[in-house]
Image (cartoon, rainbow, N blue to C red):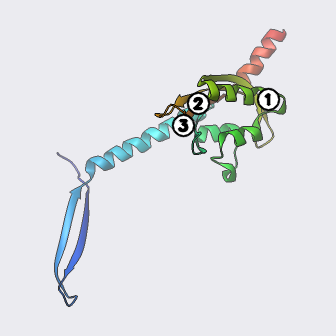
Amino acid sequence: PQGKRTYHSFLAPIRDNSGKIYRIMGITRDVTEELKAKQALEASQQRLSKAELVASIGHVEYDYANGISYWSDGAFEIFNTPEALRNPEVPVFMEMVVHNDDSEHVRSALEKAVKELAKFDEIYRIIDFKGNEKVIHGYGQVQVAKDGTTGNYFGIIQDITLTYNLNAQLFAE
């Protein structure tokens, strides 16, 4: 392979019975390809984050068995989520932001998706953490775990407020 290479070296002293160093042992490993792969992954993640922000979209994954969730930066941007509230459990978070008039419908649709391992495909309103009302399209599905139980939910959320309001104006005219 040509070009600049990156190596990781480790050195350790070898001591005799009295504790005196009499030799140095070392190992060196070429980590060039690992470093390139890591940089490519980071660049890809940055492009995904930028694309989510431009499209007003985000994604969320929730592990029902362990109550662990992952929310993308795009999702937090849609909700204007403060740093202290990031990565809550999905049901708790949804209770915090879903508009009161839509909360029962969204909760019921999410419960149905979990129970029947069906798709969740709903349009609903939220009140973000800055007090703005937004219209969201949520779409996702619960995956079946290897043991046949409820696995992870993976879905997207998209802020469709502008499109929704423009359509409402067109149909009102």
Cα distance in 3D space between marks 1 and 3: 33 Å
Cα distance in 3D space between marks 3 and 2: 18 Å
Foreground: disc 1 or disc 3: 1
Circle 1/circle 2 CB separation < 8 Å: no
Circle 3/circle 2 CB separation < 8 Å: no
**Which residue bears the numbered disc 1?**
104
Q: Secondary structure at mark 2?
A: strand
Amino acid at the residue labelled 1:
Glu
Amino acid at the residue labelled 3:
Lys
Cα distance in 3D space between marks 1 and 2: 19 Å
- The mark that comes first in sequence, 1 or 2, is 1
Specify the quadrant that holds the C terminus.
Answer: top right
Q: Specify the quadrant of the image occupied by residue 64.
A: top right
- The mark that comes first in sequence, 1 or 3, is 3
Q: Secondary structure at mark 3?
A: helix
The local crowd at label 2, few if under 14, some if 14 to 19, many if 20 or more residues have their Cα within 10 Å, is: some
Residue 68 versus residue 1: which sits nearer the camera? 68
Foreground: disc 3 or disc 2: 2
| 8 with respect to 76 (left or right) | left
Q: Which mark is residue 155?
A: 2
